[in-house]
Amino acid sequence: MSSITSKTQITEKIIQLLKTLPKDRLKHYASFKDSQLQRFENTQIVQDISEKDLKLQYIALKELVNDKYKNYYKLDDKLLKPKGNPDYYNRLISEIKGEKKETLFTAIRTVRTLQGSKPLQSLLTISVLLSIYLLYHFNVFWFLNSSSTSTPEEINSLLQNKDTNIVALKKTELTNQGIQKPYLDDSLFHVRNWNLKGNTFVENDKYIRLTSTAPHLASNMFSKNPIEAESFEMELTFHIHNEDAKHGLVGDGLAVWFLDKPSDIGDVFGIENNFNGLGIMMDTYKNGKRGTFPFVNLMLGDGSTYYNKGTDGYETRLAGCTAKDLLNPASKETKMRLVYIKNGYLSIDFNYYGKHEDWTNCVTLTDVKLPHIKYLGLSAETGQLFENVDVIENKIFALFKPDGTFVESIDELDDLIKEQNEYDEEASSLNDINQKVENIKSKTGGRNRAFKRKLSTQRRRTLKRLQNAEKRIKQREKQARLEKYGDEDATFFKRLFSRLLWCLKIIIYIVIFVILIWFGLIIYRVQKQKRKSKSTGLLD
């Protein structure tokens, strides 16, 4: 090095060494070779570097070119041939030299091979198991039990007694909460059985309008008497409309209430806040940031919980559904069907299109407790935006079993259906036997009356014995399945699938827990190693 005395000579030596470096096969944002050549070929930059620094850089570059550090910091096979992917660096070098081009499959293996990557295997396993669980959770496997499951709409139709051939319930109309045309009492010119407050307008043979197309209106109407039924079904017909509204901007909607007492005019859809009971708010204007409107929001108030209008009651929402077709329906009316059963079953359907029995379920809940004394109310309000809210009709019926007691649960429908099936079978058999007797009688005269009575009695006894025997057998089978599997209607495939699903869920939870612990240990060991080791290099 003593012969190299000038900065120019040192620079020339550095440039010669840089030119011996191979051309980069991979494209970079900046090439080391090109950037350093550009640097040392610039005389202005070289003049700013001291001769001592130039010598040090020449020595470092020379040792780098001669692979001095390859032997000095020798790498063993543990690093050069990783256990998870032993050919990683060989394939990478082959790609750089242009000897062998990577395919999509080998490129994926270059990143991390599945065969040797336990984290990737674990994550893939979790993803598959989680996908299976989500598919089942969102009822993708509906075909496994669809034949034995009724939809909420079908259950509500049964409770409405729409098809007496299936099950016959005893219904009593609650006229004190009904609304029908003409609305006004002829003598007092008031709406029968209802107290109206606020900006209501009655068109006697058309509708009761709670709000019209004017800003800042509020009104409500409550029944004078509480609902005297523990189980009931109600069908409300109404019309929310404002065809002249720009971009469909209207407000604020219609609400149906089941409260412990009638309310004065207030700022929650026309009633006072902190109510006690159930509110079903058909909200047509979005105040908060969540949801798609119109939206049906349910809230069960306790007399002290506050309804937040700014968030559309999101914090206190019991359940809800989007109801896009609630506003300006083509049929000029919307129907809401509500079914409430004593044990807490509550289901709400809507008919948006005016088609017969074309119901869409909104919510179905099984643990809703209404106040013991409950008044039915309807209310509406407008703000800066407005709409017409017209109440057209309301019919409400108490639901009784054939023995005169209230329907207490959905499970009772099964027993009622079975009883009616037995009755229909018995009636059909009786008609067949009577027809045979009449045919014999027409040939042999009145001598067969005794035969007819005997045959009828014998038929009833035989039929009853068969029915009782069948019932006992079925009951024993159900009881055995209930004791053994916890489900009286369990079939082999249903039990097998339930067990597999339960096992998958347990496996998912265990695997997730193990993976979390494993990742935690990895992070802990890496951090611990960083604290213990100090790494230095040429650039330090």
Image: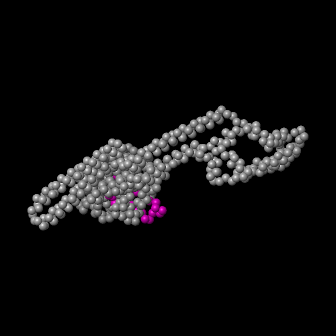
Out of 419 and 274, give the one closest to the viewer.
419
Q: Residue at x 35, y 58 (%)?
A: 336
The verdict on residue 408 being magenta is: no
Out of 158 and 506, give the one closest to the viewer.
506
Q: Position of residue 24 (x, y in %)?
A: 75, 51
Q: Position of residue 522 (x, y in %)?
A: 59, 38
Q: Residue at x 25, y 60 (%)?
A: 185
Q: Which residue extends farthest bottom?
A: 443
451 left or right, relative to 540: left
- The magenta span reads 234-257
Above or below residue 98? Residue 333 is below
Display colour scheme: one colour
The quarter in which the C terminus is drawn is top right
Res 380 quadrant in image: bottom left
Q: Position of residue 107 (x, y in %)?
A: 64, 51
Count of all numbered marks drawn on residues in the image:
0
